[in-house]
Image: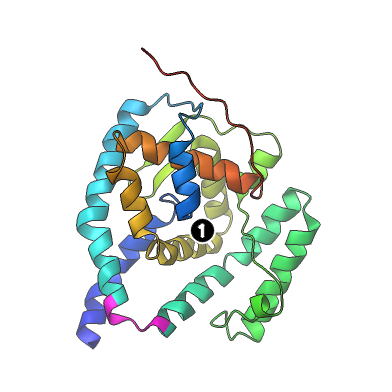
Amino acid sequence: MTQAREYFTPILLTAFLTSAFVLPVSGQEATQAVESGKIEIDDTFEGLNRVTSGFNRVLRQWVIDPAVDGYQAITPDEVQQAVSNVASNLTEPLTVASSLLQGDLDNAAIAAKRFLINTIAGIGGIGDLATEDGYVQRREDLGQALATNGVEPGPHIVLPIIGPSNFRDAAGDIAVFFTNPLPTVAAVAAGGVEYSGKQDTVKAIGDNAVDPYIAERDAYEKNREFVINNGARVEVPIIAEMD
């Protein structure tokens, strides 16, 4: 068992890097994103994006998914939950900063309380006591803060390994990384853990679509719109189908 865990550790690190920002959507939101029609998106780099997206799908199929399956097979559920809690707890400082930039003092206070409670009483975040106390997590990142302050998403891009993004979100991630790498590492770890529960959703988006690239692109951008508006429904312009 120890040898198996040592074998999967480097692969899982790759999985976390790969899946951190790959369609971070719930099953319901992903489905709605794909079925809601073609979203008005700046896809200036579509040709390059398609090549990168294809590479990422192959990587998921042959490296990421087998690694995650192995991780789930050899790791007790309790340990998986503890890992998820720790990774999630480390994203709270970024949520505090992003919420403050948006003028959302309530969410900033909740995130700060969550971090203190889970870090101290939850032993480094292993336990999520803050949720039990009624402090529900709502993650925020710099991309969301930029959007709230009027920055447009810019062209859609697909990053090698990392996956779908856009200029605004990528710029926010890069700025955070160079300011303090820890929040980015935490977000990567949290995204990797969450991906283990979303494999079927991600796979279904591509498998059930005539054009997997468009389905993944629209799902990502629709989800970003959803989280930027904190779950509020927004009317999305529809591009007419070309004859």
Q: Residues within 10 Å of mark 1 (few under 14, many from 20)?
A: many
Q: Secondary structure at mark 1?
A: helix
* Left or right of residue 198: residue 39: right
Tell me which residue sits at (44%, 46%) in the image. 31
Q: Percent position (x, y) of residue 95?
A: 65, 59
To which residue does mark 1 refer?
A: 184
The residue under label 1 is which amino acid type? Thr
Tell me which residue sits at (22%, 87%) in the image. 1
Q: Percent position (x, y) of residue 158?
A: 38, 39
Q: Who is closer to the viewer here, 142 or 211?
A: 211
Q: Percent position (x, y) of residue 5?
A: 26, 80
Magenta stretch: dominant secondary structure? helix
Q: Who is closer to the viewer here, 30 or 60?
A: 30
Q: Look at the image and tell me whether residue 60 can be seen.
A: yes
216 is within the stretch colored magenta: no
Q: Quadrant of the C terminus?
A: top left
Q: Percent position (x, y) of residue 169?
A: 53, 42
Which region shows up in magenta?
A: 73-77
